[in-house]
């Protein structure tokens, strides 16, 4: 049984430490004018891409108020007076001190951890993505789901062992329909036989296509199949032709090794829903070298998880 939760492979921005930049701030000399100062600066110096930053903060030492003026990069002069930042002819500027620099987060917080760290430097707004919070919580899957995941990966490891005995790369893959917990296709690597493109994932996708009346390869290998599904109770049943959306829509892939770029893109085109893998690969495209599944320009995205498989 698996002892740890699968780890989500997310965009790097969710794992990054807070990045700081220099901002000009002024102290407010008379708190009674704070509201007017904020509204005036909002019009004259809008924060634009830094709108997640609160305009004013109270210093913990003396309770005085500081107000954000602007990002340092917006000012060309190195020796800055208040007149370099705002229009000092306006009355509200009489209640501001000479600007000075402070370190402020230059990216909006995307996680609770980033939010807590960001607020150590300057108060921020945080719009929580509950899905991301759940993914990072380490409690995304319940016990029943973990059991199903582990059982499917067990089948995948068995396929990898079959490949090893055939002097193929030790990589196995299983594609399932999670709604019914049925195995749609099982495959192992065949690239060392006749076709260098027959990676375990590519073979698995082709077998799914064959189960729907398509497919490109005539794979004469009794260990690879698509014509039967294994139900949760271990019995077998005929696979019916998929009548829903395209190819692997809604399906899960289990694979022993992180897919390469070719396989990762094939999973995009086949519309897979989730990918689970055990081992990293030096040329892996779902975490090691690239994160293909997070590329904004693609017309389909899928979830990726890595985990430690415990066969006992």
Image (cartoon, grey):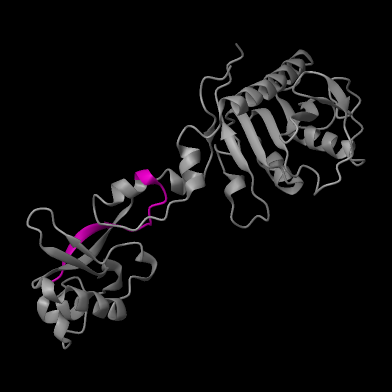
Judged left or right of residue 54, residue 282 is right
- The relative height of residue 124 versus residue 271 in the rendered view (above or below) is below
Residue 125 appears in view: yes
Q: Position of residue 87 (x, y in %)?
A: 20, 84
Q: Which residues are magenta?
A: 98-113
Judged left or right of residue 144, residue 175 is right
Q: Is residue 105 magenta?
A: yes
- Residue 289: name its quadrant: top right
Q: Position of residue 111 (x, y in %)?
A: 41, 47
Q: Is residue 210 magenta?
A: no
Q: Position of residue 75 (x, y in %)?
A: 26, 73
In the rendered image, the quadrant that contains the N terminus is top right
- The answer to which of 217 and 308 lies nearer the viewer is 308
- The relative height of residue 74 versus residue 203 in the rendered view (above or below) is below
- The answer to which of 90 and 221 lies nearer the viewer is 90
Q: Residue furthest bottom?
A: 89
Q: Position of residue 148 (x, y in %)?
A: 66, 25
- Residue 45: name its quadrant: bottom left
- Residue 242: name its quadrant: top right
Q: Residue at x 85, y 22 (%)?
A: 236
- The relative height of residue 205 versus residue 110 in the rendered view (above or below) is above
How many numbered marks does the figure carry?
0
- The answer to which of 271 and 282 lies nearer the viewer is 271
Residue 258 appears in view: no
Q: Residue at x 63, y 32 (%)?
A: 276
- The answer to which of 274 and 284 lies nearer the viewer is 274
Q: Residue at x 66, y 42 (%)?
A: 261
In the rendered image, the quadrant that contains the C terminus is top right
């Amino acid at each position: 049984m698996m002892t740890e939760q699968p780890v989500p492979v997310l965009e790097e921005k969710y794992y990054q430490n807070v990045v700081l930049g220099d901002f000009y701030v002024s102290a407010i000399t008379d708190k009674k004018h704070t509201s007017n100062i904020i509204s005036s600066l909002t019009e004259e110096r809008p924060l634009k891409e830094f709108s997640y930053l609160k305009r004013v903060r109270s210093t913990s030492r003396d309770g005085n108020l500081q107000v954000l003026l602007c990002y340092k990069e917006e000012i060309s002069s190195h020796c800055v007076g208040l007149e370099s930042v705002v229009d000092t002819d306006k009355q509200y500027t009489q209640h501001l001190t000479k600007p000075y620099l402070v370190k402020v987060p230059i990216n909006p917080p995307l996680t609770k951890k980033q939010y807590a760290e960001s607020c150590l430097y300057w108060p921020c707004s945080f719009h929580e993505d509950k899905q991301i919070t759940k993914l990072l919580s380490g409690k995304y899957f319940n016990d029943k789901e973990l059991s199903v995941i582990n059982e499917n990966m067990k089948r995948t490891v068995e396929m990898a062992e079959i490949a090893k005995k055939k002097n193929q790369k030790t990589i196995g893959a299983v594609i399932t329909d999670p709604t019914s917990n049925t195995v749609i296709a099982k495959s192992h690597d065949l690239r060392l036989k006749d076709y260098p493109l027959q990676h375990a994932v590519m073979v698995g996708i082709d077998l799914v296509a064959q189960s729907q009346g398509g497919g490109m390869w005539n794979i004469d290998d009794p260990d690879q199949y698509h014509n039967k599904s294994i139900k949760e109770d271990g019995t077998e049943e005929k696979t019916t032709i998929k009548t829903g959306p395209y190819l692997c829509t809604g399906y899960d892939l289990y694979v022993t090794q992180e897919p390469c770029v070719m396989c990762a893109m094939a999973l995009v085109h086949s519309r897979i829903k989730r990918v689970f893998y055990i081992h990293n690969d030096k040329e892996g495209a779902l975490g090691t070298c690239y994160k293909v599944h997070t590329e904004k320009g693609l017309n389909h995205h899928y979830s990726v998880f890595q985990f430690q498989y415990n066969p006992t």
